[in-house]
Structures are given as C-alpha cells and as structure tokens.
C-alpha cells in the first residue's frame, strides 16, 4: 500500500491525490502541518517538504516524479502520452503549473492566508491578480479548444486542476474571459477524482 | 536540425549539451548573454530563460524536459531507465542536481563572479562551501559505489557532471573526502561528451 506524507491543502499534494484517484490506486496518508517539519519527511527527503510518497522500496520526494512513477507503474500512458513531442508538451504544462502558476498563486494565497482582510496588501493582491490573468490567457491559448491539456485528463490536467482549485478557494476562480479554460475546469470538477481528492481543510472552512 | 538557445557557462545549458553529445545528436546553438533577454527566447518560452530547444515543431523551454524528449526521440532508454522505480530514482537525482545542488552552487558562483576577490563575502562563501560538502556527502551515499548515477551515464549523470564542472571551475572541485563521487567525476571528464560540451567561456578565461 502506498503511503503519502502530505498536507491536505498543499497544491502539490492535491495534484498527487487527483492522480491517484484517476488511476484508482489505493493509498494511506500521513498528515503534516504547515510550518512543522515531520521527522519522517526530513528523513526520507533531501528537500524536507511534502509530498513524499513511499511505495515499497520506492521513496519519491518530488511531486512531478510521483506522477511519472504512477504512470509507469500503474497505468502506462494514462498520465503521459507515448509520443516524445506530445509527452514534452504535457510535461511543460506540468512545469508551468508547478512553477509559473504556483509562484503567481502563492503571492495571492500567502497574503490572504497570513493576515486578516483589513490588513491585506491591496497593491500586492492587484499585482497577483494581474499575473493570474496573464497565466489564464496563456493556458487558454495552450488548451486551444481541446477538452483536456493532454490525453484523457493526464499529468498536466491533474496539476492544473489543483492550482485552479486553490485559486477558486481563495476567491479568484477561473475567469469567464477564458471560456475554454473555464469549460475545462468545470469538466475537472465533475470528475470523481475531484471529490475524492478535494482538501479536507477547504470543506471544513467553507 | 535542433537549435539550442543557450549561454555556454549556464549549467542547465551545459547539461543539455552533454546529453546531446552522449546521444551523438547534431545541433546548432544561438548564443545569448547573461542579463540580456533574447527576443526569440522571450517569444518561445513563458519562463523567458535559456536553454530553449527547437526540434521541428517541438519547442521545449525546460532543461529536464529536454532530456526526457531527447531520450524518447533519439535513444529510448539511454538517458532514463525503463523500470518505473529505477527511472524515479534517476529523475530524483536530476531534480536534486537542478534544485538543491543548483541553489548551493549559485551562492558560491554569484558571489565570486559578481565582484573582485577582495570584496567577497567570506561568511557567505564559508556557508556555501559547507552546503556543498553536505551535497557531496548526500551524493556519495546515493552513488553507493556504482560507476554512474543511473544507467550508462544517463540524465542524472549529465546534470550532475555540469554542476560539478561549475564547482571545479570556481575552485571548489569535488573533494577527496568523497572518493566514489570523485572517481565518478573523473570518469565523466574522461568521456568524449565532456570535451564536446565544455563551456567555451571557461576555456577562454582558464
């Protein structure tokens, strides 16, 4: 049985839970808390961050590598396409989700999460929202009218769904100005993996 | 013919050149300069950084994805092992090289490159050298007496060779306290790909 060390509202962990649900792979979780270093996580990972996945002898401490591994081990071709050029396209979207989109949404989330609304830095939030709009425009172009970003809801879709979910939970949902992206996100939310993987802490606080 | 937008002494670009040489794939380069944004790079990449690789219709703007692509397109299994668990191990070493090792060596290189020796921040450099020692100890354990980090000089080896090459060029070569890592690096330097990919600017200034 797979063990996932995680924090329920961390988008990197959320992405992995969506992928596990898409592949119908069972797992157990060990919950960690923001700002607290779990001793097993520190022992297993040179990065010291969640998620960390243990599957028998395999110890994986990077979320993108987890999706590669899950694809190869449990459902070859389901999360990543077989053609090298198409695979590269999906991998780049995954990188974009982790890096460009992650950085921009972190600006918004950290500010809103770390202090009461009356103390929010409005300029910082406005800049974050502008970047988020630019990211949505880029993603709308990349989607190019397709149903999903790669394959039948593959690695890039799992990654981007969790990011858009974070955005929605913090009041900056995918904008109607990007109809393709919005349709894609509605589709993501209608999948069983969405319910299965949705952060417990968002439900409690929502 | 592949086009690689690059900067010769950037370790991410260097890694890709080593991989191209290992696979004996021909390419042409477009040189960019530190601190200067090349218009084609800005057009092709949402990150706006080098390396960017163009191979026909495929435009790849992340160096790790480039190695995946080169493996799948030109020599399946040569840079990444076929077994999911073994592939994950090599991918994690590649992530470690790009992230943990990259961060620690950047501290050293940026300081030494950006001002004359008499102005170096000695405390910062001492901290960087301690981190570099910790990274070498981690890598020595991961290598575990093998000849290479994965396969016959695969993706992780290409990545780590360029990082250790940067370290050596800046006077903090792999230490004799890590004999396995040192033997591996000597082996890397004896490969034809080392000569083929070595940064032109290091040769000029060396």
Image (tube, coloured by chain):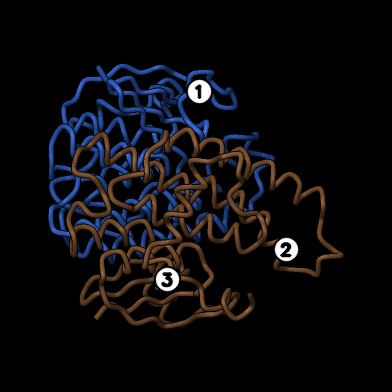
Chain colours: A brown, B blue
CA–CA distance in space, label 3 to label 2 = 23 Å
Q: Position of residue B91 (x, y in %)?
A: 29, 54
SS at mark 2? helix
Look at the picture and state if A119 lies above or below B40: below
Provide the residue designation for mark 1: B43
Of circles 3 and 2, which is in front? 3
Look at the picture and state if A45 lies above or below B28: below
Tell me whether circle 3 and circle 2 mark residues in contact (CB < 8 Å): no
Image-quadrant location for residue B69 = top left
Provide the residue designation for mark 2: A112
Provide the residue designation for mark 3: A197
Tell me whether circle 2 and circle 1 mark residues in contact (CB < 8 Å): no
Observer-nearest residue: B150 or A124?
A124
Q: Which mark is residue A203?
A: none
| Chain of the residue under label 3 | A
**Image position of B24 (left or right of A173):** left
Residue at left 36%, top 28%? B59
CA–CA distance in space, label 1 to label 3 = 36 Å
What is the quadrant of the C terminus of chain B in the image?
top left
SS at mark 1? helix
What is the quadrant of the N terminus of chain B in the image?
top left
Residue at left 47%, top 40%? B170
Mark 3 or mark 2: whose residue is earlier in sequence: 2
Q: Position of residue B3 (x, y in %)?
A: 33, 19
């Amino acid at each position: 049985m797979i063990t996932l060390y995680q924090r329920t509202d961390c988008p990197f962990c959320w992405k992995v839970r969506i992928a596990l649900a898409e592949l119908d792979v069972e797992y157990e979780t060990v919950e960690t808390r923001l700002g607290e270093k779990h001793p097993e996580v520190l022992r297993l990972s040179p990065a010291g961050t969640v998620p960390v996945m243990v599957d028998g002898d395999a110890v994986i401490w990077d979320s993108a590598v987890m999706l590669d591994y899950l694809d190869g081990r449990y459902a070859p071709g389901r999360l990543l396409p077989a053609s090298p050029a198409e695979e590269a396209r999906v991998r780049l979207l995954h990188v974009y989700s982790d890096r460009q989109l992650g950085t921009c949404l972190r600006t918004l989330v950290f500010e809103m999460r770390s202090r009461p609304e009356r103390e929010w830095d409005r300029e910082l939030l406005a800049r974050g929202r502008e970047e988020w709009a630019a990211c949505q425009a880029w993603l709308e172009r990349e989607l190019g009218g397709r149903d999903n970003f790669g394959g039948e809801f593959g690695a890039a879709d799992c990654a981007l769904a969790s990011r858009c979910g974070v955005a929605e939970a913090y009041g900056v949902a995918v904008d109607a100005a990007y109809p393709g992206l919005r349709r894609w996100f509605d589709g993501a939310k209608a999948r069983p993996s969405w319910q299965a993987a949705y952060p417990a802490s968002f439900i409690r606080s929502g």
